[in-house]
Image (tube, rainbow, N blue to C red):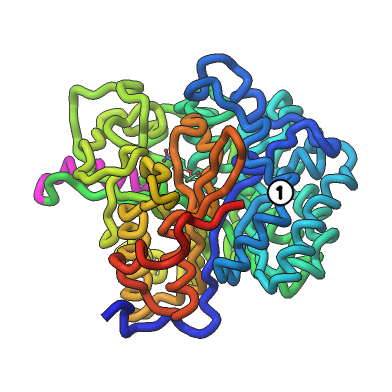
Amino acid sequence: MTTSPVSFPDGFLFGAATASYQIEGAVTEGGRGPSIWDTRAHTPGLIRDGDTGDVTDDHFHRYADDVAAMAEMGLTAYRFSMAWPRIQPTGSGPFNEAGFAFYHRLLDELEKHGIEPLVTLYHWDLPQALEDAGGWPNRDTAYAFEAYARRTAEEFRDRISYWTTLNEPWCTAFLGYSQGSHAPSRNDPAASLAAAHHLNLAHGLASRAIKEVAPDATVSIVLNTHVPRPWDPSNPADVDASRRIDALANRIFMDPLVSGTYPADLIEDTRALTDWSFVHDGDLETVRGSIDLVGVNYYSSHVVRFNADLQLGDGADGHSTAPGTAWPGSEHVEFMRPFGPLTTMGWNQDASAFHAYLLRMHRDMGLPIMVTENGASFPDVVSADGRVHDPDRVRYLHDHFAAVLLALRDGADIRGYMVWSFMDNFEWSHGYSKRFGLLRVDFETLARTWKDSAYWYQETIRTRRLTAVERAAELGTTPAASY
Ligand code: PNW
């Protein structure tokens, strides 16, 4: 028995995902302006090993070969982002024809191979000029984003059906403006809450603009899920800690979309930081009902508890063991050390929490779901036989695809699944030290080599059934295909 008896539904999209700054390189070519990630990457000490996205996978020049590999793998969809500073170098001035031309060339290749494009308008590369004018804590940025979205939708309305406005606004607001572990590297908890609201507003305005330009478009936002669970479910303080994290990470974005409100408990929890007067009349009406589909990025789950001794700023990494300042208003919430085996990000592997989260999204949002990112980083090496044996990643993907099958059985309307990532790339502040790809990239030569997980995925797509983990090493070629 090498495949699961249960098959994926007709039309289910099997894809992979990337993001502009993580793969494109060519940061000064074709009229691209600087983004906040160029600035962070070129600030000494902020990225591991001093890495930058200046070249990364050089996808800007190698896109045709990359799309050919996607076709070879059998992908039926590809999720990528457009770089705002490539399309509009200063974020509010003129649009750049050379930037549009690059994405037309990429779309040509995808079309040639029948691969459905899933386009994200904002995957964190804010034009630096907009940050200089105040960034996301400044309301004007939301209107700038609306104009960029409208013009880009006009350009591509005949070529793109699936539009995502924002990728993971939680990361932008809280890692970018409060914890400072992402660009623009600020430490201002109050500003991060204003940023979160302006991201919601930007999404609502952009969604409306896209629909005006392309009424048949499927518009979505991509949320990064946090699945917090209380350490001791019988202890009300731990349950309350979990509630706070759910409010700050999930409901702050879900509630405006569903009911046009912010959660009352969130407003209460953050009262010492802000009176929320940045929310103007009508803002939330713009957000309510603004998506046709919700994008879910899922990697890991968390166990949290109340700890009276913790102070805001104790931890540097809001994702793993300590609250840091990624969680304004939650200074006494402790993130417990995750249970192993862990990925090289230090994240746990918890497919059952993924299943539970998909059902929660289905219930609370009442919308179709696209899994827009899921995957894992492991220390991949090229073996003596010229293959990249990555059984841990195969196991992770297998178990998470199985969770999707279970959620489909349970009634969730899941339209597809994008593996993060198509190829190894610039993993933000971790530089090139974390490998998430189906393809291995040698960052000296930029050669791409198929990992066993890529062959496993190819077989899974071909059969539309989950391929057994043990099969992965028997598939493909020795040495592995590369280009
Ligand atoms: C997501 N956290 O990022 C992004 O959408 C990708 O660009 C990224 O490469 C991928 O996941 C893997 O990290 C996240 O600290 C980065 O909570 C950090 C966090 C969450 C998501």
Above or below 36: residue 9? below
Number of dots carrying numbers: 1
Q: Quadrant of residue 235?
A: top left
Residue 288 percent coordinates (x, y): 58, 61
Whether residue 281 is visible: no
* Amino acid carrying mark 1 in the image: Arg
- Residue 219 shown left or right of residue 17 in the figure: right
Q: Secondary structure at mark 1?
A: helix
Q: Is mark 1 within 8 Å of ligand 1?
A: no
Residue tagged by mark 1? Answer: 62
Per the image, is 425 magenta? no
Whether residue 393 is visible: yes
Q: Residue lying farthest top?
A: 44
- Residue shown at 66% from the left, 28% from the top: 38
Q: Which residues are magenta?
A: 234-248
- Residue shown at 60% from the left, 25% from the top: 41
- Residue shown at 71% from the left, 38% from the top: 141
Residue 169 percent coordinates (x, y): 54, 45
Residue 478 percent coordinates (x, y): 45, 58
- Residue 40 shown left or right of residue 384 in the figure: right
- Residue shown at 36% from the left, 74% from the top: 466
Which one is nearer the viewer's eye here, 269 or 103? 103
Which one is nearer the viewer's eye here, 307 or 218? 218
Which one is nearer the viewer's eye here, 264 or 186? 186
**Image quadrant where one finds the N terminus:** bottom left
Prevalent SS, magenta region: helix
- Residue 112 shown left or right of residue 359 in the figure: right
Residue 44 percent coordinates (x, y): 56, 14
- Residue 164 shown left or right of residue 47 in the figure: right
Q: Quadrant of residue 217?
A: bottom right
Above or below 147: residue 408? below
